[in-house]
Image (cartoon, helix red, strand yellow):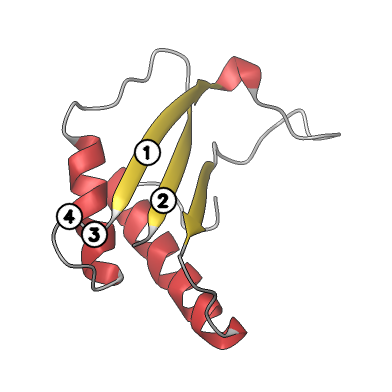
Amino acid sequence: MPVIDIQIILAQGEQLRSDLAAELANKLGQVLNAAPGQLWLRLQTLPSSNYAENNDPASKGLPVFVTVMHAQAKPAEAMQTEAVALAQAVSGVLARQRTH
C-alpha cells in the first residue's frame, strides 16, 4: 500500500480547490495501479513566504514536493520510471511544470 505525501508551495493568495486531494489520490492510484482504498495520500500546503532556495532570489517557479513510501523497495529502474510517471501526473493535475 503506497503512502504519498504531497506538499505544495502556494503563491500569495493562492488557494487549492476542495476536491484536489481526492483527484490526486485517484490519478496517482491509476498511475500506480492501486486497488480502491489501497493508496493513501496526505496533502499539505506551505506559503511561499516560508520557502526559499539558497542564493536564488528570483525563483523559477514554486515547487511541489512528493514523497512516496512503499511497503517493499523496488528496483532502481522501476523507481525511476515510477518517479517520472508520478511527476507527470501531479504536474498535470496541478497545472505546474513537471520540473518543479
Residue at image location 49% in from the left, 50% down from the top: 66
Residue at image location 31% in from the left, 55% down from the top: 92
Q: Quadrant of residue 62?
A: top right
Residue holding disc 2: 4
| Callout in the foreground (3, 2) | 3
**Cα gap from disc 1 to disc 2, whole angstroms:** 6 Å
Crowdedness near tag 2: few (<14), some (14–19) or many (≥20) residues, C-alpha within 10 Å: some
The reply to whether the C-beta atoms of the residues labelled 1 and 3 are less than 8 Å apart is no
Q: Residue 8 location, x and y as percent?
A: 46, 34
Q: Residue 99 location, x and y as percent?
A: 55, 57
Circle 1 SS class: strand
Q: Quadrant of residue 86?
A: bottom left
Circle 2 SS class: strand
Between disc 1 and disc 4, whose residue precedes? 4
The three-letter code of the residue at mark 4 reads Gly
The numbered disc on residue 42 is 1
The reply to whether the C-beta atoms of the residues labelled 1 and 4 are less than 8 Å apart is no
Circle 4 SS class: loop
Circle 3 SS class: loop
Residue holding disc 4: 37
Residue at image location 63% in from the left, 18% down from the top: 50
Residue at image location 29% in from the left, 26% down from the top: 16
**Cα gap from disc 2 to disc 4, whole angstroms:** 13 Å
Of residues 92 and 20, the one nearer the viewer is: 20
Q: Residue 96 location, x and y as percent?
A: 41, 47
Does residue 49 sit above or below 57 in this rendering? above
The three-letter code of the residue at mark 3 reads Gln
